[in-house]
Structure formats: structure tokens, C-alpha cells
Amino acid sequence: MLQHQGEDIFVIDGHLHAWDATKENIIHEGGEQFIKCFYDYHTGFTPEERQWTLEEFRTYSDEKFLSDVFGTGDVDVGIFQPTYLKEFYEDGFNTIDDCGALADEYGDRLITNGRFDPREGEAGLEDLERQAREYDIQGVKVYTAEWRGDSKGWRLDSEDSFEFLQKCADLGIENVHAHKGPTIRPLNRDAFDVADVDDAASSFPELNFVVEHVGLPRLDDFCWIGTQEPNVYGGLAVAAPMARDRPQKFREILGELLYWLGDDKILFGSDYGIWEPDWVLDAVVNTEFTEEEKAEYGLEFDMETKKKVLGENAADLYDIDIEERKAALRDDDLSAEFDTGAQYEGAAD
Amino acid sequence: MPVTADAVRDALDDVTDPELDQPITDLDYIETLDVSDDGDVHLAFVLPTAWCSPTFAWMMAADARDAASALDGVADVRIELRDHMHAEEVTRGVNEDLSFETAFDTADGEVASTRATLDRKARLARQYDAMEALDDAGVDDRQLARLRRGDLTVEEDRVTIDLDGLYVELDARPLERYLEKARAVDLVTDDDDRLFASRDEETLSPADVPRARRASRLAKTNMGGQGGVCASLHASRNPELADD
């Protein structure tokens, strides 16, 4: 747990990856461009002494992942967001089966989401059923800008997509995380347009739509949608590391999100392995609005709001009872390994 | 008289990164600016990443070419985009005066509509600064809603606002910057046109002003926030240029 001003904050990191971008797995130049683009984001925002080499960045062991996230990282529960990109990577970049193996082993610690791509048709629907069956998924990550054949992307509000969203609703997969963020070479920028979330969200009120990366550089369009659709949420991955090196920009973005969407709608995510949660969390939790900002937005980033953003909001979406979970984590393998069990003492049994 | 590098640089102050609405000179994108005795201009620039939108790169290269070419004493202008996935297409296309669609055989979307969308966002973002400046000068929401283009008189770096016979004077820059984009999107062209508008470019009543102001603030935060992402990437990739 994260300690802040004498209180414990239960942290759910809503955006984790376990990827493989080794040269052996790359089958298209887009795969090399994609990982190098991620690496530019890594070096652009990571403190110099914490930067990895490109080779370290291409893939990482389970041990390193667990240590960075749950050891030094202060994260209590994490959610994997798979990214397939099978046109670029032979075995995929970050698949549900890679993530699912770890999530199976550390069930109280890791949740894996699934994914779908409506262009896969019937086979895709069947695979979604398989994912629900094998991994009991509660959410999916969707990548509307993913390449497939001649197609350079798809829209969430298309007829085909609605068929998959209906399947999600039927299977009880309630959380749809859409990557809507900065351009990632070589994916098509226009496919990151956030407008398609609007119609999908109003057509499927029983689902929750989490716009990852808060739509940057379309934060304005995203917030506008968020004010109108009660089931639209914002994931802070990519915005969060700005809390360290561009704190004023981060406060402005956070202020707008809290103002337009409200404090129940914002979810923390580190985007590991692009960034390590420990320094990202440190920067976010130490963010305080100035008096002028408090007056402008009419709100505060106080302890109650921090707890919501860093854990409670994700706990609501993923049906996690935080007190029960603390009791389960007190004696688990990772608490023993990283000597973190004591922080969960006092949790209700 | 031959043109100086300073004069060219001044002209480039009007060329903006369309997504961030900031001058390329402030963003430290310019790597080389050479002006020969004969008035030949060579401008080389880089962007925060090698995969920045080619459409935006094209707009900056073409705008820089046009800004430099318009100066007296300039002979030939050569623009060079460096270290970019599409450096060759942009450099060749802009120097040979090709259209974007001709220079890129895989282009999806065209420059004019992208520029129009970003101009509308920049108009809204700049409205925030203009409204804030007027608010600081004591202009209230009722007056803001009713202001027309013709109520403004710019002299040197000051602007005088006529509020039904009451006059307020302030720094002209936020209003001039706003008017530049309001003209570009055809929102404010005549003296009779209302100065400010909603996010959807509709006329404001006094009661609409607070929401329009917040929508403007949001547009500015978006451009500034993305600017922060780009600046961090730029500082990491081009440390010799970016001084932040």
C-alpha cells in the first residue's frame, strides 16, 4: 500500500503489460517502430537514473515485473490490458494468454482483461467466449487503431463492434477499456478519435467505457463526452508521469477531468513497463492544487479523492472489496517475498 | 536590400505547430536557419518524434515556406524536415510545391479539413485568454456576451473596448491572437459580428458565458497538456535544441 500523510492508500494499477518485443518476435517493421515509440515515451518521462536500456525494455521477466509492481511499486492489485498486434509480432505483443498465466498464479494480485477485434467476425466472438470461460474476464481492452490486412482501424460505434459489445454484455464482461491516446507509430492517428465512444456508451448503458490515456490529445472531446455519458471513465496512463516533470500541466489535466467527469470516474494506471509505478505514484499522490486552482475548478485533490482515483474507483468497476482483499494479501506469496505483509495488518478477516 | 536571418526568424514566429497552437520558434523545432547574401533561405527543422503526424509536419513545412517567401529580399526558399519517418516526402513535396495528396500516395485525410478542425480548437483555446484578459479589466459576462468586433480599436499594443460609451483599455495581444483565429474560422469577419461564441460557435447569452469560458479553458488545457507530452519527448530526443 502507498503511505501518504500518515494514511494507507490501497492502490489498483489499472494499466499493466507483460510484453514481448524481442527481435525474434517481430515480423513486420511496424513492430520495431512500435516498441521504439514506446521507448521514446519511456525515456521522455522517466528520471534519468531510472531509465532502462532498449534491450531491457524489449521484454522483461515475470520476476522483474512482480518486483517492480508489487515490491518497489506499492501496488496492491494490478490489471493487465492486452495488446495483440499480431500483424507486427508473431506471438502477439502482450496477449491474454501471456497475462492470464501470471494472473492465474497470483489471483488476488492480478486481473487480466481480454480483448476483441470486431474484424475477426465469428471466430472473434468465439474467442471472446473462450476468454470469458478460461480467464473469467470482467473487462476487455480494445485497440481501435490496430492494423488488420488492409484495414488500419475500426470504430467502436460500428455495427460489427456493437455485436461484440452485446456479446460482452451477455457474458457479463462489463468494462471496456479503449486505447484513445497519443499517436503510436505506425498506428493511424484518426483511429484514436474519441467520438465513437459516445454512441457506444449511450447504446450500452450496462457497460463501462474507460477511455485510456484520457483521450490525449483530444482531452477536450473526451471530457465533453464524459459529461454526457454516465458510464464513461478516464484512465490516467500517460498523463500520470507528467505529474513528475510537468506538474502544472498534470494539475490542469487532472483539474479538468475532476471538474467535467467527477472524482468517481478517474482511474490510475502506470502503463508498466513504459513507466514504473513507484515514482509515478509518488508524483501523483504528492500532487496538490494551488489555492488559485482550487478556486478555478471548485474542488480539491484531497485524501478522499486520492483514494478514489488510486484504487477505490477501479475496485468498484472490478467488484473488489478492499478490506477483504487486504486480509487475503496479508499472507500471500508476494507479501512474504517483498516483506509487505505487515501493512495489511488490521484488515478485517 | 538583402533579407536578414532575424527578419526570417521573425516571420517564422507566425508559423505554429497546429496541434499545440504555439510558434515553431518557441518550440525549438528549428535546427538550422541559413540566409545567404543573395537572399536564399535554408531552413531545417525537427519534430519531437520521428512519427509525429505527417499532416502536421506538412502544414508546418508549407507554412514556413510561405512565411519566408513572402518577405522582401528573399530569393529561393528551401525547407528541410529532418529525422522523421516521412522526411523525404515532406521535404520534396513542399520544395516542389506538390499537394499533400500527391506527395503521399498513402495519405488518408487531407490537409485542409485537418487544418480547419485544429483552427477551430485553437480559436476556442485562444478565447480563454481573451476572456480572461477582459475579465481582469473588469468586463462582466453580460458585456462579454454582447461584444462585437467593431467595439474593439487596436492601436499599437493596446486595445480600447467600447462598452456602450464606457471605455476599457488593455494589452492588445490576447485579443489580437484570438481575432486571428476567429477570422481563420470565419466566425468574426465583420464589425457587426459578435466577438465570442460557444464551443460549437453559437452566439452567447450572458448566462452561457461561464460554460463557454470553461469549454475554452478545457481546449487550452488540452493543447497545453499535449504540448507537455511533446516537450518531454522533444527534450529527450533533441536535447541540444530543447532547453527546458
Image (cartoon, coloured by chain):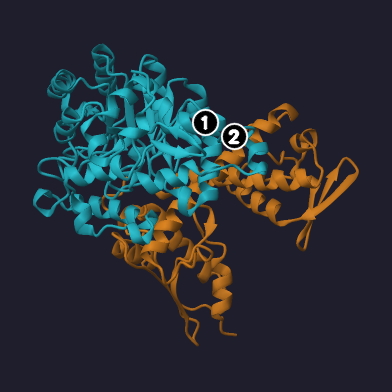
Chain colours: A cyan, B orange
Q: Is residue B48 visible?
A: no
Q: Is residue A283 above or below residue B212?
A: below
Judged from this view, the residue extending furthest toward the right is: B165
* Residue designated by label 2: A300
Specify the amino acid type for callout 2.
Glu
Q: Position of residue A94 (x, y in %)?
A: 19, 39
From the top left corner, tell me how far across and down residue A255 is, in percent: 56, 38
Mark 2 belongs to chain: A
**Upstream in the sequence, badge 1 or badge 2?**
2
Residues tagged 1 and 2 counted as in contact (Cβ below 8 A): yes
Which residue is pictured at 32% across the width and 62% down the height?
B84
State the residue position of label 1.
A305
| Quadrant in the picture for residue B23 | bottom right
Q: Amino acid at mark 1?
A: Thr
Residue A143 x %, y %: 28, 35
Q: Nearer the viewer, residue B6 or A82?
A: A82
